[in-house]
Image (tube, rainbow, N blue to C red):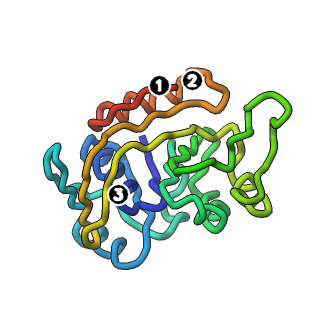
Amino acid sequence: MRFAIVGAGAIGAFLGARLAQAGEDVFLIARGPHLRSMQANGVCVRSPEGNFKAHPTSTDDYAAIGPVDFVFLTVKAHSLTEIAPQLSPLLGLDTAVVSAQNGIPWWYFQNHGGPWEGTRLESVDPGGAIAGAIEPHRIIGCIVYPSAVIVEPGVIEHIEGNRFTIGELNGESSDRCKSLSSILIAAGFRSPIR
């Protein structure tokens, strides 16, 4: 499978390095000295579960990657307004977008049901820029449990945690969630579907 990890800081680089180590085709999208270090030296992970190094492709050029199977959004939620319109080169017909941010996500009221169905929170998605760039059918929700920090460019310290809980917005157990869960488990994570 092809993965693009958008915002490959501590959590994104850790996730991408594990996926790459498990044999997946991974592209890390980052910037600055962290990007340059990962391009030159790969990603070094220091972890209580064992240290390792992986060499996923690292870039800041979305168009050079092309469509992928899964896009993980691991940027801080406040950065999504700027980043969402840049995602289109990554989105093929069946590309899923895994929202891995803390807090109330822009998609919270999509497939929610009830009187708030389809409500957009201006404070979370100013002007609807995120919802306009990512169709609701693409979204897989994700709760991120790992704790990690960048100790120096290209070097991630994984402190604890290895669970990425995922799920469809409507609560159904889909084939794409089952596939993603299996891949994450093969990469050494816990990945229940909720």
Q: Mark 1–mark 2 contact, CB under 8 Å?
A: yes
Q: Is residue 33 above or below residue 64?
A: below
The answer to which image quadrant residue 125 occupies is bottom right
The answer to which of 172 and 148 lies nearer the viewer is 148
The disc labelled 3 sits on which kind of residue? Ala
Secondary structure at numbered mark 3: helix
- To which residue does mark 3 refer? 13
Q: Residue at 24% of width from left, 65% of height from top? A: 155
The disc labelled 2 sits on which kind of residue? Ser
Q: Is residue 37 above or below residue 119?
A: below
The answer to which of 112 and 12 lies nearer the viewer is 112
Q: Position of residue 179 (x, y in %)?
A: 45, 28
The disc labelled 1 sits on which kind of residue? Lys
Marker disc for residue 174: 2
* Residue 189 relative to residue 61: left or right: left
- To which residue does mark 1 refer? 178
The answer to which image quadrant residue 167 occupies is top right
Q: Position of residue 100 (x, y in %)?
A: 50, 48
Q: Residue at 43% of width from left, 73% of height from top? A: 31
